[in-house]
Image (spheres, rainbow, N blue to C red):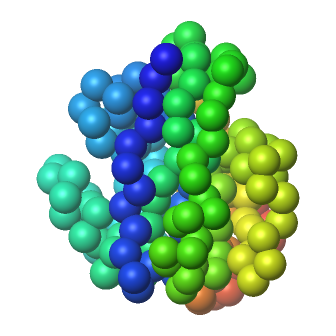
Amino acid sequence: MIQSFAPFVNSKTEILILGTMPGIASLEKQEYYAHKRNHFWKIMYTLLDNLPISEIFEEKIQLLQANKIGIWDVLENCERKGSLDIHIKNQKENNFETLFKEFPAITKIIFNGKESHKYFLKKFGQIKGITYHVMPSTSPANTMSFKNKLKIWSTCFEYPINIFLGKPFDGVFDDQ
């Protein structure tokens, strides 16, 4: 049985990014999105215009929290062989009822991948007053290019900008 981490949220959190369950590299380092090929931190630092990416996990969390963003996982614990969500079984979801009561400013959930959304929706359904956005997984198992992941993730934030063209994202993706 593997365990997720505690949530990184505070009273100012408005956007909650949810993964499914940390992968092996993250569990070993006890840090969210620790695999060196996971695009999560590169996407966040790029969208928040704060490159280069810090090597210090606490600074990464501070950047998210300064931008009213929290992170957690849908699952509290599960059995899983390897790091892929498709191998999850005997899962138990985190206590979101309590989380949303304690942190009522959360009005948007961004799911890091389809599996996190699937597990959340199955257990909690659509929660009134909270909008859901399902983004491509930042995991290295998702072979979509960084550029396309970044374009799609940018649509979840206040000013969805196509940073490559300097204009609003038009929904058209390059094959690069």
Tell me residue 84's x, y (percent): 60, 23
Tell me residue 29's x, y (percent): 25, 32
Q: Is residue 139 above or below residue 47?
A: above
Tell me residue 19's x, y (percent): 56, 47
Residue at position x 38%, y 43% in the image: 5
Q: Is residue 112 above or below residue 157?
A: above
Residue at position x 65%, y 28% in the image: 91
Name the one closer to the observer, 164 or 86. 86
> Quick one: which residue is furthest to the left in this view?
56
Residue at position x 31%, y 81% in the image: 66
Residue 137 visible in the shown view = no
Q: Is residue 43 above or below residue 93?
A: below
Q: Is residue 78 above or below residue 62?
A: above
Q: Is residue 33 left or right of residue 150?
A: left
Q: Is residue 56 left or right of residue 97?
A: left
Name the one closer to the observer, 91 or 116. 91
Residue at position x 64%, y 76% in the image: 108
Q: How many numbered dots are placed on residues in this image?
A: 0
Residue 21 visible in the shown view = yes
Quadrant in the picture for residue 104 = bottom right
